[in-house]
Image: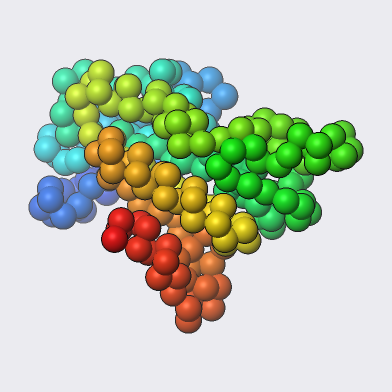
Amino acid sequence: MKLKDEKWLKLSERYHECPNNFLAYEILNEPIAENPSDWNIVLNKCIRAIRNKEPNRFIIAGSNMWQQTSSFPYLEIPPNDKKLILSFHFYHPFALTHYRAYWVNNYSSYNGPINYPGKIVTEDYLKTLPEGSVKQILEADFFNEKQTLRSKMEPAIAYAKQHKLPLYCGEWGAMNTLPRNARLNWYRDIINILNEEGISNAIWSYKADLGIRSNDGKEVDNELISILIEE
């Protein structure tokens, strides 16, 4: 714990003169703590260290367990600190957003049908799959539509409103290996929700896999960009 304090003290010492409208700090990207109190302790100690020199610096405070929205009820932040920005990442439903993602060992081999909105696959097709991790992943989030996605974001939205703090979706996106219509439908619903709720956001990523450019960076997905800026 002391080591993390020292690192943030050194960063604060170096950057504390940067304008507050130019630089913000994020304590840790996608923290993972089996006990949520462990993350709360680290988060609050680091915030206190930064506040020694920078009482007005904006600090991004992410939720525990990869910044999932479901962990927000367990998040503890300093009271009355209005220079905090709450952050979550959003990749729901996982079976859709990580379709054929090569780094997901228990799901990367699946190249069968996938759909959004509605049922991820048909019930008849699901019955044909052998028992195992692929079937479990498809079953976990079987039905999805815009309201489903909004309800998954609700713990973060409610927490931000309760504490009267801005909310930031620091990562969201879906694999370019998805069927075209399903991918664009999902992006359209997500950006609508974020805009309706006034949530600032950044997609992951710029190119390849979940990007708006092709893997080699040469081709631009202008249709997806139009959805993202709601033209």
Residue at the farthest bottom position:
218
Residue 126 lies in what quarter of the image? top right
Q: Residue at x 48, y 21 (%)?
A: 36
Task: Return the residue nearer the eye: 115 or 25.
Answer: 115
Q: Residue at x 19, y 24 (%)?
A: 164
- Residue at 52% x, 73% y is 214
Image coords of residue 56 (percent x, y): 12, 38
Q: Nearer the viewer, residue 23 or 128?
A: 128
Q: Is residue 135 left or right of residue 70?
A: right
- Give the quadrant of residue 52: top left
The answer to whether any part of residue 35 appears in the image is yes
Question: What colouring style does the render use?
Answer: rainbow
Quadrant of the drawing holding the N terminus: top left
Residue closer to the observer: 64 or 91: 91
Q: Position of residue 33 (x, y in %)?
A: 53, 28
Residue 148: % across, % down? 49, 31
Of the 4 image quadrants, the one containing the C terminus is bottom left
Q: Give the residue drawn at x 48%, y 25%.
A: 70
Residue 135 locus on image (x, y percent): 78, 37
Q: Is residue 181 left or right of residue 61?
A: right
Residue 77 lies, with reference to residue 25, above or below; the image says above
